Image: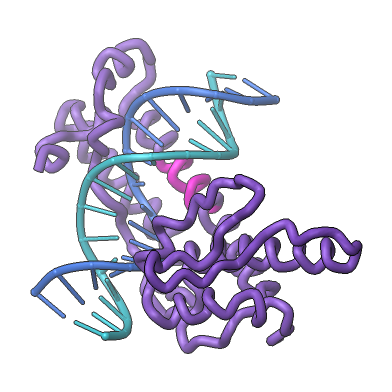
Chain colours: A purple, B blue, C cyan
DNA sequence: TAGGCCATCTGGTCCT
DNA sequence: AGGACCAGATGGCCTA
């Protein structure tokens, strides 16, 4: 694979610099990554990765040499900024996951042994909003905004009357039967608070 | 063992 | 200029 042969810009420096970076990274892991190394995901019990993926991703690697020469900072400085950037990205993803967790808590759904995946959470949230919108329309004596269609043939669960594009429809088809059952009964289950 | 899901790293792009 | 956001890549864990 191509990415395996490539190296990150800050790894293209002289060897002595590279040694410094490795030590820096090791120290960084000692101090900060004990969170990710030893702790496990509370909900799933999964161990978090200590190190991530490739040194460089395919799409992001073009033109980096020129860019590197423009910035007059040392390899150590680049590495430091990269590590700081990684930390921020981790924190950002953690906050995103917290938001997903909060969303899971407020979405009525059939209790499953495993927690809802992200795509399941988003899809159920969307359907929940649609169901509630219909309830509001009903209370106002208006026509329902959305129509839930149980189409066995197409495996599609919810169709939208108002022309809103169903972004998750393709992803829905990849989910397991338990999830499908959950979705298919959603208009009913959405109105029953299971908390 | 394959496939799904996920955490993390990484570099590019956008925004302030 | 620096941080936030994004998407691609990678590898670990889990389940059928």
Quadrant where the image shows the N terminus of chain A: top left
Residue at figure coordinates x 50%, y 74% from the top left: A116
Which residues are drawn in magenta? A83-91
Residue A37 can be seen, yes or no:
no
Left or right: where does residue A93 sit relative to residue A190? left
The front one of C9 and A69 is: C9
x, y (%) of residue A193?
A: 73, 83
**Image quadrant of residue C4?**
top right
Quadrant where the image shows the C terminus of chain A: bottom right
**Image quadrant of residue A44?**
bottom left
The front one of A166 and B13 is: A166
Vertically, is A45 above or below A139? below
The prevailing secondary structure element of the residues shown in magenta is helix
Number of residue marks: 0
The front one of A24 and A43 is: A43
Q: Residue furthest right?
A: A140
Left or right: where does residue A23 sit relative to residue A29? left
x, y (%) of residue B12?
A: 37, 24
x, y (%) of residue A122?
A: 56, 61
**Residue A70: within the magenta?**
no
């Amino acid at each position: 694979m191509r990415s395996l042969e490539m190296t990150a810009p800050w790894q293209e420096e002289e060897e002595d610099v590279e040694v410094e970076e490795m030590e820096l990274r090791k120290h960084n892991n000692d101090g900060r990554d004990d969170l990710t190394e030893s702790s496990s995901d509370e909900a799933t019990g999964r161990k978090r990765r200590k190190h991530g993926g490739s040194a460089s991703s395919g799409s992001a690697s073009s033109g980096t040499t020129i860019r590197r020469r423009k910035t007059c900072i040392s390899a150590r400085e680049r590495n430091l900024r990269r590590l700081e950037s990684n930390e921020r990205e981790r924190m950002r993803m953690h906050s995103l996951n917290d938001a997903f967790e909060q969303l899971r808590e407020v979405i009525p759904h059939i209790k499953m042994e495993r927690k809802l995946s992200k795509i399941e959470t988003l899809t159920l949230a969307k359907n929940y909003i649609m169901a509630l919108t219909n309830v509001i329309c009903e209370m106002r004596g208006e026509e329902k905004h959305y129509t839930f269609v149980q189409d066995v043939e197409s495996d599609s669960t919810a169709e939208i009357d108002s022309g809103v594009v169903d972004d998750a429809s393709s992803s829905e088809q990849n989910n397991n039967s338990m999830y499908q059952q959950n979705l298919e009964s959603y208009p009913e289950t959405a109105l029953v608070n299971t908390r």
